Image (spheres, rainbow, N blue to C red):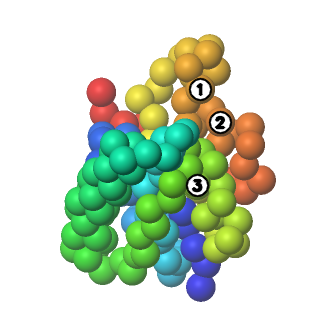
């Protein structure tokens, strides 16, 4: 059984990516690893640790929606909250799971904007050593 890694943050982009990943998993008989990546604060301290804890709680809440959607479709998923920027988190999980592909959503921003602002899909297209599926989201 293979694995599909999908970036999910509860946004319209995440919803589009999750739907595509669930469709593919059902067709291919793959498992889905839902990844919520978040950049950790740079310096550890009381307020920053509380901030990270709040982000983790938010990630748990958001990924619960992914679990519900997968359950409705009868697709088995695993959720990982990874304290790294989204692209790095997705690549790390994809490598560890020997994933067939990484799936992310996009609003279809112009390529130059993605390069300048550092969009996750753009970073993945240049950094990932696995196939990347970029799914358009409704605007």
Q: Is residue 13 left or right of residue 113?
A: left
Q: Which residue is mark 1?
A: 118
The residue indicated by pointer 3 is 90
Observer able to see residue 6: no
Pick whichever of labels 2 and 3 is earlier in the sequence.
3
Say which of 62 and 29 sits in front.
Answer: 62
Residue count near mark 1 (Cα–Cα under 10 Å), binned few <14, some 14–19, many ≥20? few
| Whether residue 40 is situated above or below residue 3 in the rendered picture | above
What percent of the width, then of the height, locates residue 93?
A: 61, 64
Q: Which quadrant holds the N terminus?
A: bottom right
Using residue 120 as the reference point, say whether residue 23 is left or right of it. Answer: left
Packing grade of label 3 (10 A; few <14, some 14-19, many >=20) is: many
Q: Earlier in the sequence, mark 3 or mark 1?
A: 3
> Does the image show residue 50?
yes
Residue at the image point whose x is 72% and y is 49% from the top: 128
Task: Identify the disc placed on residue 123.
Answer: 2
The answer to which of 102 and 38 lies nearer the viewer is 38
User: How many labels sit on residues?
Assistant: 3
Q: Quadrant of the C terminus?
A: top left
Q: Identify which residue, 67 or 81, lies in the foreground.
A: 81
Q: Residue at x 31, y 33 (%)?
A: 138
Are circles 2 and 3 on residues that touch, CB within 8 Å? no
Q: Quadrant of residue 65?
A: bottom left
Q: Is residue 43 above or below residue 122?
A: below
Q: Position of residue 133 (x, y in %)?
A: 57, 48
Measured Cα–Cα span from mark 3 to mark 1: 15 Å
The image shows residue 129 at horizontal and vertical percentages of 77, 53
């Amino acid at each position: 059984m293979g694995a599909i890694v999908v970036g999910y943050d509860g946004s319209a982009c995440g919803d589009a990516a999750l739907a595509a990943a669930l469709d593919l998993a059902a067709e291919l008989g793959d498992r889905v690893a839902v990844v919520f990546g978040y950049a950790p604060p740079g310096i550890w301290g009381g307020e920053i640790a509380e901030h990270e804890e709040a982000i983790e709680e938010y990630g748990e809440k958001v990924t619960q929606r992914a679990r519900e959607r997968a359950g409705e479709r009868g697709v088995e998923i695993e959720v990982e909250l990874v304290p790294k920027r989204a692209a790095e988190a997705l690549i790390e999980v994809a490598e560890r799971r020997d994933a067939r592909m990484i799936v992310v959503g996009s609003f279809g921003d112009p390529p130059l904007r993605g390069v300048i602002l550092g969009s996750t899909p753009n970073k993945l297209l240049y950094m990932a050593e696995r196939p990347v599926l970029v799914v358009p989201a409704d605007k």
